[in-house]
Image (cartoon, rainbow, N blue to C red):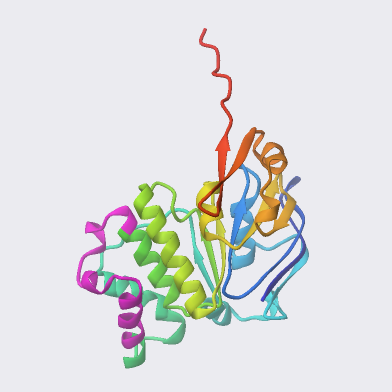
Amino acid sequence: MLSVNQLSFGYGKKQVLQDISFNLQAGELTAVLGMNGAGKSTLLKIISGLLKPSAGELLLEDKSLHKFSKKQLACKIGYLPQNVLSMDCTVFEAVLIGRKPYFSSHPAKEDLQETASILQLTGLADFADQQMLHLSGGELQRVAIARTLAQKPSLLLMDEPINHLDIRSQLDIMALVRQLAVRFNITVLIVMHDLNIALRFCDNFILMGEGRLYASGGREVITTDAIADIYRLQAVLHNQNGLPLVIPCPVNEPSVL
């Protein structure tokens, strides 16, 4: 569905990404993992079209990304940045914004119906008339996902969507994303930090280190050696009710002068 071939990018003389290649399939969640500064967010910005690669090729549904018009990309790709900002409008109006690629000046009846349907699917129907400014962090994130789904994308890019949320909200958001990906056959690429939540919900994993691809694949790529190389951290892998669990080993406390 999405093919990334030998992708490279740099800011001036600073190389941020180098020779990144992987493939994503429809209906699956793929987590992008690595330390801060590994180039994860930059990768998503390039795929979304916000940044232009210095080398490499991006194919979406076997078609080069640069051959899509901006309107076509707005319908094909949904992008959730790290920081979701509240707006002075109702939840319904916020989600309706996601339908903008499908109308010019005023939304049609179909756009209103699609918005109402998405609010129902994402558990936001009872919040439709509430002001965005009054929502919690988890509710805001759910609205952002609903707004992106209103675009009816085939590819959904999410940059750290569960950071700063409590553990219950994190699990709820990830469960929602997985349910919607499977139901609508959406390809999801999601930057994450929590290895255990990634292992719980994602099908595939892209491990990055210092702008390079370390490994990509299923759960088999999450090994103690990979964790040591990518995160400079010793850990053990434990099976808990059929799910792999990453348990970091104790580290030496820094000395206090």
Query: Is residue 110 rendered to the left or right of residue 51?
Result: left
- Residue 246, compared with residue 127, is above or below; it is above
Which residue occupies 39% across, 65% down?
144
Which residue occupies 71% across, 48% down?
211
Which residue occupies 35% across, 47% down?
166
Image coordinates for residue 223, horizontal then vertical, percent: 69, 45
Taking the view exactly as shown, the residue that stands out farthest to the front is 241
Does 155 appear in magenta? no
- Residue 229, compared with residue 5, is above or below; it is above
What is the quadrant of residue 254 in the picture?
top right
Dominant SS type (magenta):
helix
Query: Is residue 119 rendered to the left or right of residue 19?
Result: left
Which residue occupies 59% across, 53% down?
41
Image coordinates for residue 29, horizontal then vertical, percent: 57, 65
Query: Is residue 164 rendered to the left or right of residue 13?
Result: left
Magenta span covers which residues?
112-138
Image coordinates for residue 237, horizontal then vertical, percent: 61, 42
Does 129 appear in magenta? yes
Query: Is residue 250 rendered to the left or right of residue 22?
Result: left
Taking the view exactly as shown, the residue that stands out farthest to the top is 257
Q: How many marks?
A: 0
Q: Is residue 84 visible?
A: no
- Residue 228, compared with residue 67, is above or below; it is above
Image coordinates for residue 253, horizontal then vertical, percent: 54, 18
Q: Is residue 83 visible?
A: yes
Quadrant of image for the N terminus: bottom right
